[in-house]
Image (tube, helix red, strand yellow):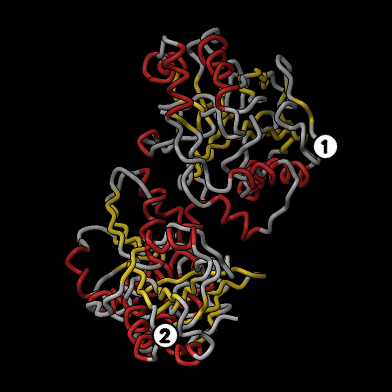
Amino acid sequence: MTVTPLIAGDIAKKVIRKEPLFILDVRNEDAFKDWKIEGESVQHLNIPYFDLLDGVEHILEQLPTDRPVVVVCAKEGSSILIADMLSEEGRNVHYLKGGMKAWSEHLEPAKIGDLKEGGTIYQFVRIGKGCLSYMIVSGGEAAIVDATRMTEVFTAFADELGVKITHVLDTHLHADHISGGRQIAEKTGAAYWLPPKDASEVTFAFKPLEDGQIIAVGKSKMKIQPIYSPGHTIGSTSFIVDDAYLLSGDILFIDSIGRPDLAGLAEDWVDDLRVTLYERYRALAEELIVLPAHFMIIEELKEDGSVSEKLGTLFAKNHGLNIADEKEFRKLVTDNLPPQPNAYQEIRQTNMGKITPDIETQREMEIGPNRCAVR
Amino acid sequence: MIQTDMKLDAKGLACPMPVVKTKKAMQQLSPGQVLEVQATDKGSIADIKAWAQSAGHQYIGVHEEEGVITHYLRKTAGEEAEAKRFPHVVSNEELQAVLAVDEDVQIVDVRESAEYAFGHIPGALSAPFGELEAVLRSLDQETSIYVICRTGNRSDMAAQKLAAAGFRNVKNVVPGMSGWNGSIQKLMN
């Protein structure tokens, strides 16, 4: 029987379309518990490859024949070995090309909407890790917000649209993933914007984002307006695009809110977070479409694979926006913090330009789930 | 220098080969022997340990230096099931109490040198069970000797040997290093 490789994009599309899929994850149990390919239509079986070296006959009856079976491991080597063994036992199986590393790096673009004066806003969904990046295109120019380190995806996308990248922005100094912003700016000559309060230690030149400033994209009236919104980091900044979209960074998510502790300052920043969510955001139009920098669970993806919600709807439904008592709010965001992201200190150092790990090390640093929120 | 019974070079090999080769090498060892595996694949750090646990072998420890990851594993000896026969036994806690007041005691650690390297009681003499006889000659037969291993079985056999060789004041420490809460010295991190 045959072994067919699937690329991460094939699996991402199946997850978004909710097509039945069976994942035989052959990584060790701790790695599987830490993070895995998730989806409403995805079933899993975790048996480490080293427990299958003597044969796979005993697991055959646990593998369905009515849906694709994909063998998955960290890089792909073990999954090919096990897929070949299953094939010899008469099964048609797939393996994930590049393994969980490729899954972690895959970006799936989705169109969010058109802009009033012409132009479009796109979202890039890093489905394996939960990061969301944005490209705002207008009048032959493009701005990129919260780019991941897979920079060629963004530059190739801009090339395909025939637009020039003129601005690159990060809502804050990221701690869960390595920013591609600086690299894109260097490659394209675009301006690189950072919140100055998050960038006090960076080793490179940048343009400071300031409250109320207007950054134009293209010749149309499309504009990005930064609003200072501390809480996740001291400098966290949100953007209002085209008076219609609120890019909320790691401050507000669809079903959760930002965590204030990744620089070790939960107690200090919890008040900033509350003021941002309960006063600054309250003052904004409820019609704004919130576009966060992360999704937390796969259920947040819409039919088309994108992630967004009206600000008014979040005020009604997001638990983190509906805690009247300040003490209770403080308790939620300081007592219930999930484990910190893998290598978050090194990731912050990298994003400040203080260290420059090689690509293999950068991959290792980012492995694992995103953990930027409290629910 | 850690003495091992076999060395496996898995440097430059990608997953799954370090585990596949480790499994094969372990099949060639006798129970109780120690294998040293050198690898460069970072995934081997979690996987060789997880494999050893799943296969029932003792994972002694791992040491990383200049990009080379060195694993130490000991083949299961089935020793946990054996009955202890040496009559003079002390608990870990009793030994700790003795160490607190009496400096004139000799601890003899009969585990393999790799096990000793990854953590032993300060001042303990390393005397792997197979080399016990050579070490015996350096000891005074009148000294208080506390024999220790991981779970109390190898030390049980060693204590019997010591008594048979004329040592008058020998005790077996149970359970031994697997349950040791006192201070620890390491040659390896």
Q: Which residue is at a point 60% across and 28% down the rendered structure image?
A: A265
Q: Could you tell me residue A272's position as x and y percent?
A: 59, 17
Q: Which residue is at a point 35% across and 74% down the rendered structure image?
A: B172
Disc number lying in front (1 or 2): 2
Q: Which quadrant of the figure contains the C terminus of chain A?
A: top left
Chain assignment, label 1: A
What residue does disc 2 label?
B129
Hey, which quadrant is residue A170 in on the image? top right
Vertical relation: A283 (above or below) A277: above
**Dot 2 amino acid type:** Phe
Q: Could you tell me residue A11's position as x and y percent?
A: 39, 53
Cβ atoms at labels 1 and 2 below 8 Å apart: no
Q: Could you tell me residue A234's position as x and y percent?
A: 65, 25
Q: Is residue A38 left or right of residue A278?
A: left
Label 1 sits on a secondary structure element that is loop
Chain assignment, label 2: B
Q: Which of B108 and A85 lies nearest the eye of the viewer?
A: B108
Vertical relation: A141 (above or below) B121: above
What residue does disc 1 label?
A205
Q: Which of A60 and A164 lies nearest the eye of the viewer?
A: A60
